[in-house]
Image (spheres, rainbow, N blue to C red):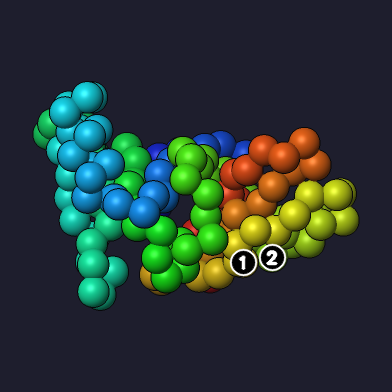
Amino acid sequence: MGDNNNKIGSFAWVDLTVESADEVRDFYKQVVGWESDPVSMGEYNDYCMLPPGKEPVAGICHAKGPNSGIPPAWLVYIVVDDVDESAEQCKRLGGKVLVGPTSYGGQGRYCVIQDPAGAVCAVYSDKQ
């Protein structure tokens, strides 16, 4: 995740997960002027997107591996204290857990959830 404000309840990051991250990366480079920084996922690269000369502001990811179940929409990550507890609360309150909870490359844990109205977001903690 980015080094954005990591206070509980704040937005920490935003990702877009799509079938062709390379094509969509190039689209956003042309439309909004972002540069890209590849992030190795082993056999392919996902991308951190950044304004010229600035810190990363978003990710564009392939719908592969751990991202295979994430819908193709801009996904916000909201900081929570405990991802597993938030996932349980989500289910208790009528929401759905779509992906996870899972570890994120040694940088914390996340879980993609759907609220009772159908909106999708992710909860994230930098705690393992």
Picture coordinates of residue 1 (x, y %)? 39, 52
Picture coordinates of residue 8 (x, y %)? 61, 44
Please report whichever mark, 2 or 1, sits nearer to the chain's N-terminal start: 2
Looking at the image, residue 104 lies above or below residue 18 = below
Left or right: where 7 falls relative to 85: left
Picture coordinates of residue 126 (x, y %)? 50, 59
Q: What numbered label is drawn on residue 101?
A: 1
Residue at 18% in and 44% down: 36
| Mark 2 → mark 1, Cα distance in angstroms | 6 Å
Q: Which amino acid type corresponds to the residue marked 1 in the rendered image?
A: Pro
Q: Which amino acid type corresponds to the residue marked 2 in the rendered image?
A: Asp
Residue at 85% in and 49% down: 94
Crowd class of label 1 (few under 14; some 14 to 19; many from 20; radius 10 Å): many
Left or right: where 127 falls relative to 86: left
- Label 1 near label 2: C-beta < 8 Å? yes
The residue where tag 2 is placed is: 84
